Image (cartoon, rainbow, N blue to C red):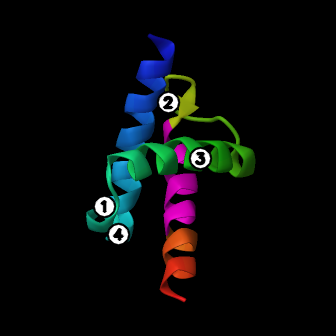
Amino acid sequence: MGLIWSLIVGGIIGAIAGAITKKGDSMGLVANVVAGLVGSFIGQLLLGSWGPTLAGMAIIPSIVGAVILVLVISKLKSK
């Protein structure tokens, strides 16, 4: 159950990052989950694990990390 919960939360975080960056329309479900999970790792690495958590992910740092990841990936894809 923990893995499924992490995938769901990762997908939500990725979808939020896509909405913030206006790149969400081009991202699919799998990309949202990957962006959320990897973004969560990046955000917590850079900002620490503070604030509310779900499925072991600090929400605010995770969203910030996912936004950074989506922006970097979209910039690399546009070149």
Label 4 and label 2: CA atoms lie apart by: 25 Å
Q: Earlier in the sequence, mark 4 or mark 2?
A: 4
Q: Which marked residue is nearer to the observer: mark 4 or mark 2?
A: 4
Label 1 and label 2: CA atoms lie apart by: 20 Å
* Residue 53 on image: x %, y %: 51, 27
Q: Which marked residue is nearer to the observer: mark 3 or mark 1?
A: 3
Residue picked out by circle 4: 23
Q: Are marks 4 and 1 in contact (CB under 8 Å)?
A: no
Q: Secondary structure at mark 2?
A: loop
Numbered label attached to residue 38: 3
Magenta segment's dominant SS is helix
Label 2 and label 3: CA atoms lie apart by: 18 Å
Q: Earlier in the sequence, mark 3 or mark 1?
A: 1
Label 4 and label 3: CA atoms lie apart by: 17 Å
The N terminus is located in which quarter?
top left
Range covered by the magenta-colored residues: 59-70
Label 3 crowd (10 A; few <14 / some 14-19 / many >=20): some
Give the residue at x 48% y 85%. 78
Numbered label attached to residue 19: 1
- In the rendered view, tell whether residue 4 sits above or below residue 68: above
* Residue 41 on image: x %, y %: 65, 43
Residue type marked 1:
Ala
Numbered label attached to residue 52: 2
Q: Earlier in the sequence, mark 2 or mark 3?
A: 3
* Residue 65 on image: x %, y %: 58, 54
Label 3 and label 1: CA atoms lie apart by: 17 Å
